[in-house]
Image (tube, helix red, strand yellow):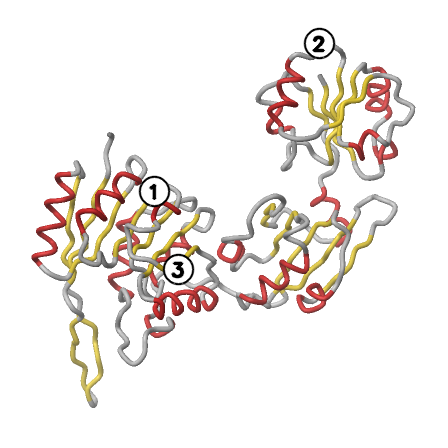
Amino acid sequence: MKMIGIGDNGAEGLLPTYIDWIHECEVLVGGERHLQFFPEFTGEKKVIKGGLSALTADLQQETRNTVILVSGDPLFYGLGGVLAKKLPLEIYPYTSSVQLAFSKMQDSWQDAYIVSLHGRSIKGFAQRIDGRRKIAILTDEKNTPQAIAAYLKKFGMTEYEAFVAENLQGEEERCRFFTLDEMEQSFFSPLNVVILKQCMAVERASLGIPDDRFVQRKPDKGLITKKEIRTLCLQELELKDNSIVWDIGTCTGSVAIEAAKIAREGAVYAIEKNEGDLENCLENQLKHRTDLTAVLGKAPERLDEFPDPNAIFIGGNGGSMELLLQTCLSRLQQNGRLVMNIATIENLAEAMQHLKNLGCEVSVLQAQISKSKPILHLTRFEPLNPIFIVTAKKGKN
């Protein structure tokens, strides 16, 4: 069984050998657009429609000489990667849409970050691309070039210019450069690839964003996990680039935002009971180029809306510690880590007891930090409030 990549120029772009294979086969499988390129084919045509499970089951029973037509490179966000695990395929790729788009743009693409928004949510896109110099994007009818431009502008990512390649190798091919404002106001064919390129260098923020760069509650500022404590908590969480993270009692969103920058191929979910603090969290997301899910509520309520996490940070428990810890640990994935900030010895003792009863491996870091502060022509130290950082590791059930 052969799988052949094909472009929008149809048979014109295929090698003669591939065309011979198509005409010699008994069954030709492909999308309606692909099959229309071969009106003279006399064998059976099967249109790819609906879910892949039915198609896979059908092809597994097929004993006739079969050729499958797939757009571009079948192993580049295509059917090839799925079907090759189930079928004995010979795969013959065509040029991918991204490769064609860069050739039209006349720019190299070995240094590009490639992301597909085709059939996927744009959620989290901001932190995934932040600081990247060159990005290629596969779009769909929802995540259009116009929608992408509006999204980037919302997060202040105006350092990008865009190149949009439409209907590549088709009769209505069109390739154009745009500013984000121009792209937001223009219209495009549904078949397009967007390339973003920095027109000025923008660096990503390093770990430990200064506290004064977060919007905080007024006039009583200070309800924020301080930079130094925040950094210690993040290293205790041991986040990976694809981690799923919960931040409970997020307040300004400082921990959630820094977590999203680390786990930018994963996802971060935050909950906050105070409406004003949640509004600050949402504003801080835009300011710091992170697109995470933040909801209003008092945990453990609404946690069932989040996927099972690899890491959980608890900045505040609202007085229902036992139920909250039971809920969190029942959802935490195996070998996941839960980190709590605790200010009093009474709450520390309670947390230790609950976590041990729940079968966790527990460690505590007491952080007593002082920061230098000028006084006239001299320097003194000003202490931060002492804090206990409790880390619980979930073992095997």
Residue occupying the point 39% across, 69% down: 280
Whether tag 3 and tag 1 are in contact, CB under 8 A, the answer is no
Residue occupying the point 17% across, 76% down: 382
- CA gap between label 3 and label 2 equals 54 Å
- The kind of residue tagged 2 is Thr
Q: How far across and how far down the image is residue 162, in percent?
A: 68, 60
Mark toward the start of the polypeptide (3 vs 2): 2
Q: How far across and how far down the image is residue 196, in percent?
A: 64, 58
- CA gap between label 3 and label 1 equals 16 Å
Residue beneath label 2, please? 63
Q: Which residue lies furthest to the right in this view?
A: 40
Q: Nearer the viewer, residue 94 or 337?
A: 337
Whether tag 3 and tag 2 are in contact, CB under 8 A, the answer is no
- The kind of residue tagged 3 is Ile
Q: Which quadrant is home to the N terminus?
A: top right
Q: In which quarter of the image is residue 99?
A: top right
Q: Which residue lies furthest to the bottom in this view?
A: 376
Residue beneath label 1, please? 310
Local crowd size for mark 1, using a 10 Å CA cut-off: few (<14), some (14–19), many (≥20): many
Local crowd size for mark 3, using a 10 Å CA cut-off: few (<14), some (14–19), many (≥20): many
- CA gap between label 2 and label 1 equals 45 Å
